Image: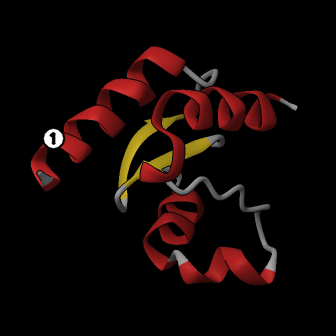
Amino acid sequence: MAANWLQERLDRRFGSQVRFQYVELFSPESFAFPDVMEAIQQGTHQLPIVLVDGEIVLSGSRLNEGLITRHVRDQLQKAH
């Protein structure tokens, strides 16, 4: 699964600085993200959806490691 591959890559690059969570659509965990669920229902975003620090950074395309890594790195730099 692509999500597992991405998780391994992010773990290798950022270690314990990041937490990766894969959430299956309509699972109980998915309802913890009401903005994402609403965006899917309204058709403004498509799967897969990737959030970094609560912000949608990718929607409806292949998992883009470079794009996701940039967003993670930016968030980590803002935190320091």
- Quarter of the image where one finds residue 21: bottom right
* 32 is higher (above) or lower (below) than 19: below
32 vs 16, nearest the viewer: 16
Helix, strand or loop at disc 1? helix
Q: Is residue 45 visible?
A: no
- What is the total number of numbered labels drawn onto the structure image? 1
* 70 is higher (above) or lower (below) than 71: above
* 30 is higher (above) or lower (below) than 70: below
54 vs 13, nearest the viewer: 13
Residue drawn where x is 34% and y is 58% of the image: 53
Residue drawn where x is 52% and y is 42% of the image: 15
Residue drawn where x is 50% and y is 79% of the image: 34
Q: Is residue 74 visible?
A: yes
Residue drawn where x is 40% and y is 21% of the image: 67
Instruction: Locate residue 7 relative to residue 13 in the image: left or right.
Output: right
Residue 14: % across, % down = 46, 36
- According to the image, label 1 marks what residue? 77
Residue 7: % across, % down = 68, 38
Instruction: Locate residue 60 relative to residue 6 in the image: left or right.
Output: left
Instruction: Locate residue 16 relative to residue 52 in the image: left or right.
Output: right
- Quarter of the image where one finds residue 47: top right
- Quarter of the image where one finds residue 24: bottom right
